[in-house]
Image (cartoon, rainbow, N blue to C red):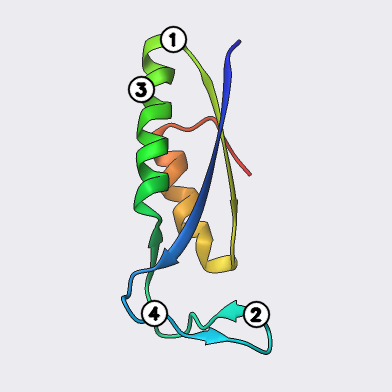
Amino acid sequence: MKKIMVCVKEVPNNDRIEIDYEKGVLKRSGVQSILNPNDELAVYWALKLKQQSGFHITVLSMGPMQALKTVDYLLALGLTTVI
């Protein structure tokens, strides 16, 4: 079976990004996060390959617990595995 791994990340849906330099992380409170549009395009093409050639798709992501809504979204699209 052919396999594909797609890496995805949630990003702030905001033009003004604030960084907590002490912790080295983005300040996410009060800012809606979305799936990175470029990553969503990669998922789209992976799904095309799945439809055409039966690829097994694994998606790898990292992020805070709020990223679970993106995991649910990706599973609903028909991805085989989300890590």
Residue 31 circle label: 4
Residue 48 circle label: 3
Residue 68 circle label: none
Q: Mark 4, mark 2: which one is toward the viewer?
A: 2
The quarter holding residue 41 reads top left
Q: Find the distance from the CA under tag 3 to the CA under tag 4.
A: 32 Å
Answer with left or right where residue 60 lies relative to residue 16: right
Q: Are marks 2 and 3 in contact (CB under 8 Å)?
A: no
Q: Is residue 60 above or below residue 66?
A: above
Q: Are marks 1 and 2 in contact (CB under 8 Å)?
A: no
Answer with left or right where residue 64 lies relative to residue 49: right
Q: Find the distance from the CA under tag 4 to the CA under tag 1.
A: 39 Å
Label 1, secondary structure: give it.
helix
Return the residue at label 2.
24
Return the residue at label 1.
53
Label 2, secondary structure: give it.
loop
Report x, y in % for residue 15.
31, 76
